[in-house]
Amino acid sequence: MKIIYCINSIRGLGGIQRVTLVKANALAEVAGNQVYLIVTDNWPYHKLIHEISDKITLIHLPINYYADDYKSKFQSLISNVKIFKHWKLLQKTINQIKPDVIISVGQSEKYILPFLHTKAIKIREIHFNSNYREFTYQTKWIGKLLQFLDFHINTHGYDKVILLTEEDKNVNFAHNKKFTAIHNPLTTGRLEHYEKRQNKNVIAVGRLSPQKNFTSLIRAWALIATQIPDWHLNIVGEGPEREKLQNEIYQLHLKDSVTLKGFSSEVNKELKESSISIISSLYEGFALVILEAMAMGLPVISYRFPYGPQDIIDHGKNGFLVPNQDEQALAARILELVQNEELRNRMGQAALKRTYDFDISLIVQKWMTLFYNETQQKRRK
């Protein structure tokens, strides 16, 4: 089976790039598969975010959407015109390869694939939650309009649309058979055996941005900090809200129990040196950081935000799901795990076991089943 992934770039930091490479590498190992990665911005001076199998054919279309974006906002706007060149070169490449499946990861190519002339199955991946614009657009009607165009108009040109969570599917597309859900795989390392933790560190990992909502976590920590003076909260990540968060820490007199540790290239090491992980986001596409913490044997406490936690965490078994933005409830669950070592270790062991449900081998089976079913259905038409 010939499978094409279309993506802007596989270099630089980014979850979409990492997940795409992990899946592409695994699909390339399936007997009979030929996997192609078609990129528009090769960025040769940027780090390759994940190794790429020598069984994959990498094709660079010289579009370079972002080459001049840094010069001005006008230049950034003009870059959008390159989509016509992108369509022309992509169509030419598709004609040569004659793929069975072509996949958009939801970047520049998402508006092009519906207009390609091909017998291939067209698949659109959604790497965010489907209503993320409700959180990110200040002008709500613009966000809702773009959401409608993206998920109710543009998706007509696809055979299948893949969401990251069952919750997103059930809430927003319960009666639309074109939409289905396949989880992201675990993309980082995993402990071979569970290790009991003796440290007294709680960790939160993520960009210091409004989406991650670390202000709420810091306020929740302030409610219990005096009860657990020998425990410490570490927030690992960097971003535009550093100054705001640091001021919050000082104002709540938490400078001795909360640390903004900055960016780390060794997140697994930070997780291993912790006993509990907290997720306080306003929204996510899947919250891969939950799996990454579980893979290091940490129980996870998370708000019930849209979407991800409820697909991953078994409440009371490998972590806790807290009413969304309820800081009192979040603080109470943190305190419960801090004060109960037996529960902490039992949940940590169950968390590690849970990550095997997201092993790349199982995720690839789901994708291959989808490819087979869709191609068979198309042949019958």
Image (cartoon, helix red, strand yellow):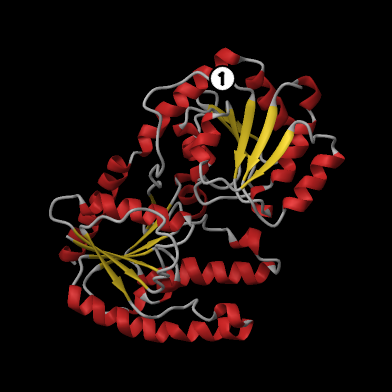
Residue 164 lies, in percent from the top left, at: 44, 50
Please tell me whether mark 1 sits on a helix, a strand or a loop. Answer: helix
Residue 361 lies, in percent from the top left, at: 27, 41
The residue where tag 1 is placed is: 344
In the image, what residue type sits under mark 1?
Arg
Instruction: Say which quarter of the image contains residue 83.
Output: bottom left
Residue 370 lies, in percent from the top left, at: 27, 53
Location of residue 256 with respect to 108 vertically, above or below: above
Q: Residue at x 44, y 67 (%)?
A: 45
- Closer-to-camera residue (380/363): 363
Q: Is residue 203 visible?
A: yes
Residue 209 lies, in percent from the top left, at: 67, 54
Q: Residue at x 68, y 66 (%)?
A: 140
In the image: residue 174, left or right of residue 322: left
The quadrant of the picture occupied by the N terminus is bottom left
Location of residue 220 with respect to 116 vertically, above or below: above
In the image: residue 56, left or right of residue 207: left
Q: Is residue 326 visible?
A: no
In the image: residue 257, left or right of residue 36: right
- Closer-to-camera residue (277/138): 277
Instruction: Say which quarter of the image contains residue 92.
Output: bottom left
- Closer-to-camera residue (246/323): 246
Q: Residue at x 13, y 51 (%)?
A: 31
Residue situated furthest front in the rendering: 45
